[in-house]
Image (tube, rainbow, N blue to C red):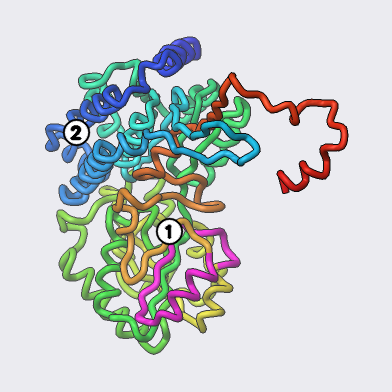
Amino acid sequence: MGSDGFASRIARQRRLVTQGRTRPLAWRLEQLGRLEKALQPEEELLEALAADLRKPPVEAHYEISSVRQELKLFRRQLRRWLQPERVTAPLIMQPSRAWVVAEPLGCVLIIGPWNYPLMLLLSPLVAALGAGNTAVLKPSEHAPRTGELLAARLRQHMDGDVASVVMGGPETAQALLAHRFDHVFFTGGNHVGRLVMEQAAKTLTPVTLELGGKNPCLVTEDANIPLAARRIAWGRFLNAGQTCLAPDYVLVDPGVRDAFLTALQQAVLDFYGDDPQASPDFGRIVNDSQFRRLAALLRERSVLWGGHTDPTERYVAPTVVAVEQWDDPLMEEEIFGPVLPILPLPSLEEALDAINSRPHPLALYLFSGRRAWRDRLLAGTSSGTVCLNDVVLQGGIPQLPFGGVGESGMGAYHGRAGFARFSHQRSVLQRPQGFDAPWRYPPYGNRLRWMRRLLG
C-alpha cells in the first residue's frame, strides 16, 4: 500500500472517532469482545510462536493469557474509568461545576516487537480500544508467522476501520510514521526508538516508547541462594534470554558467589537437562543477525559454563560468564540472549554508584532479606520497575503500570495506566448564565487590596 493508501486509511479510522461513534461504553466493550474472539482457537497461535521463536507452548500460552488478563481487567473496570472526575472550583469561581473527562485520542499507531510478537502488539491494542481509539498495527517482520496470523484473525473478527494491520519491514514503518497519527506506541530497541521519536516529531505526534536496558540484579549474602538461583535462571533463560525484563547481569556477594553459581548451574540442569539444545522447553534466537551478534560476544571468551552455539538452529546455550570490569563488552549494551554475566557485589553504596552511572534500566532486582537494603535501593535508584526477591513477574500484573524511564522508555501502560496513556484528560468548566459578578471586569479601580485577600 502506498502513501496515499495509508493516508486514506488513517483518515477513515480517525473519522470513526471524530464522529463520536467510538465513545459509548457499549462500542468499546464490543471491540474488546471481538479481540478476545481473535485469540481463539489458541493452537494456531502456539504453532505460529513456535515457528518464529521455537517458543515452548507454556511460554507461548503466557503471551496469550497476558492479553486475556488485560481484557478481563478492562471489561471489569472500564465503566468506572469512564466516569467524569469531579473537581471543586475555587470559591471565587462559584457558582460553577468542573470535571475531567477521558476522551479518545483518535487513530493510533502500534509498532510491535519480535520477542513477544503477540502480547506486545495486542496488549497496547486492548488499552487503545478501551480508551475509544482506532488503531493501525505494524507487527514485526522478524516474527512473520505470528504477524500474518494476527492480521488474518483481526480481519476476521474486527472491522478494518477499527483495527487494521500493515505488514512489512522498516521501510513500511517509516512510511507509516510519515503520516500524522494521534499517538505512536513503539516497543523495541533504543536505536529504533530514537528513529521513531525523531520521525514522529516531524508531525508533532506524541509517542510512548517501551524500550529496554541492562537490568541489574543484586544477590546479598543473606539471600535464599537456591531460590534466588532458580528464579534468576528462569528469568534470564526464558524465551532464550530475549525478554526486555530479564536480569541482564548479576552482582553477587563474594561470600556466596560459589554457592550461587553451583545453584544456578543446578537450576539450568533441572530446567533443560544435560543438553538444553534437545530440550523442548528452550527457545531459539529469532534470526541470523541476532545469532551472529551473540556469537561474537562469546567468541574468544572464557565462560564458566555453557557457551555452545549452533548456527544451523540459531541455538545459543544457557551461558554464564564471569566479568570483573564494568567496561567489559558484555556490559556495554543489553545482551538480549541467554548469556548471564556475573560480577562481584561490592558494598551497597558502590553498587548503587555503579548502577546510577549508567542509563536507567527497565527493571531492577534485589534478592535480600534486609529491609535496609530494600529501602536504600528504592530511595537511591531510578528504574522503570522494581521486583524484590523475584524477577520478571512484575510485568505480568495488569494493575501495575509498565514502562521505562530515561533510556529504557517513556510512558507506561497496563490496566488504568494504559487507559490513561491512550486518553486525553479533557478539562471542563460550566458556569451559569444568570449570574455575572462585576468585580472581574475593568475598570478595576481600587480592587487590588481585596483581590489579594480573596485570591491569596
Q: Which residue is mark 2?
A: 39
Q: Report the label total.
A: 2
Give the amino acid at mark 2.
Leu
Distance (Cα) linking label 2 and label 1? 28 Å
Q: Could one spot residue 141 in this view of the protein?
A: no
- Regarding residue 374, the answer to whether it shows in the image is yes
* Residue 205 drawn at (x, y percent): 56, 29
Q: Position of residue 419 (x, y in %)?
A: 39, 38
| Magenta segment boundaries in residue numbering | 356-381
Q: Secondary structure at mark 1?
A: strand
Residue 247 colored magenta? no
Q: Which quadrant holds residue 132?
A: top left
User: Which residue is at 15% across, 66% downward?
Assistant: 273
Whether residue 389 sits left or right of residue 51 in the image: it is right
Q: Is residue 252 shown left or right of residue 152?
A: right
Which percent across, then down, holds residue 389?
Answer: 32, 71
- Residue 370 higher or lower than 162, as above or below: below
- Label 1 packing within 10 angstroms: few (<14), some (14-19), many (20+): many
Q: Secondary structure at mark 2?
A: loop
Q: Residue at x 29, y 80 (%)?
A: 225
**Residue that appears at 19% across and 36% down:** 45
The residue pinned by badge 1 equals 385
Residue 354 lies in quadrant: bottom right
